[in-house]
Image (tube, grey):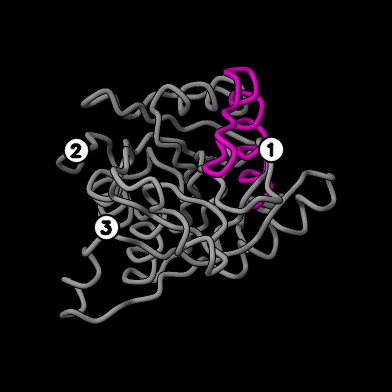
Amino acid sequence: MSIHIPATVGQIAPLILLPGDPLRAKAIAESLLEAPVLFNETRGMLGYTGMVDGQPVSVMGTGMGIPSISIYVTELIREFGVRTLVRVGTCGALQPEMHIGDLVLAMAASTDSRVNQRRFSGQDFAPVASFSLLSRAFATACEQGWPVQVGGGLTSDTFYATDPDWWKDWAEHGVLAAEMETSALYTLAARHGVRALSILTVSDHVITGEHSSPDERERGFLRMAKLALSLLDRAGQVH
């Protein structure tokens, strides 16, 4: 049991999917896991463990932003022995050739947050995905014919920006999309020697102003969850 997750050791699987929205965690558990069991509802952050092809898998919401995901990821790793963490969330596209519903595999995560500068005494740290997870997810998405982009993402502390041109410098340097959690996830995974990957779905387009419909969000969300679950092989291992 930890401060924010009143589960016991063994209730949470070594592989966990991490949507920001706890209701999406519930939807994943009910749609994709066999016999899901609720292990957390403290602060409304729903978490479930169920089975996929005979192997345990967990899913839990993390809330929005670096502080929230950092609390849950730290406790999941330290207190419950989670070894593979896959964020499944939405993002805003920053490149003109991207489309609503595209999958984005975040190879690295830039950030406008100062969390890592404080951690590294004013220096920058470049948080990156686990290559084994990234390469396997990319191959699977291509096999399925799902539109997928691989590259850098931006983890921002700000959802409602006051500068309308905030995205342009990032886009000019090839950043694909913006969201609010990946940099923290990758940094904590590196610190604790575990594996992490962010699988994102483009829900809106910063350049064109397009937004996905509720139905598009639901279908896209389940698709990236299925991609995350494909990382689990029949022996219950994640490579």
Query: Which is more toward the observer, 92 or 129?
Result: 92
Q: Which residue is mark 2?
A: 4
Q: Which residue is mark 3?
A: 78
Q: Is residue 235 above or below residue 225?
A: below
Q: Nearer the viewer, mark 3 or mark 1?
A: 3
Mark 3 belongs to which amino acid? Arg
**Residue at point 67%, 53% (across, down):** 235
**Residue at point 52%, 53% (across, down):** 198
Q: Is residue 32 above or below residue 96?
A: above
Q: Of the two numbered discs 2 and 3 on the same chain, state the one appearing first in sequence.
A: 2
Q: Of the two numbered discs 3 and 1 on the same chain, state the one appearing first in sequence.
A: 1
Q: Nearer the viewer, mark 2 or mark 1?
A: 2
Query: Which x, y percent locates residue 83?
Result: 44, 58
Mark 2 belongs to which amino acid? His
Task: Find numbered disc 1 in the image and state the secondary structure of the residue it sits on.
Answer: loop
**Residue at point 81%, 53% (across, down):** 142
Residue stretch in magenta: 203-231
Task: Find numbered disc 3 in the image and state the secondary structure of the residue it sits on.
Answer: helix
Question: In the rendered view of the protein, which quadrant contains the N terminus?
Answer: top left
Q: Could you classify mark 2 by the number of other residues whose Cα lies within 10 Å: few (under 14), some (14-19), or many (20 or more)?
A: some
**Residue at point 44%, 54% (across, down):** 167
- Residue 53 badge: 1
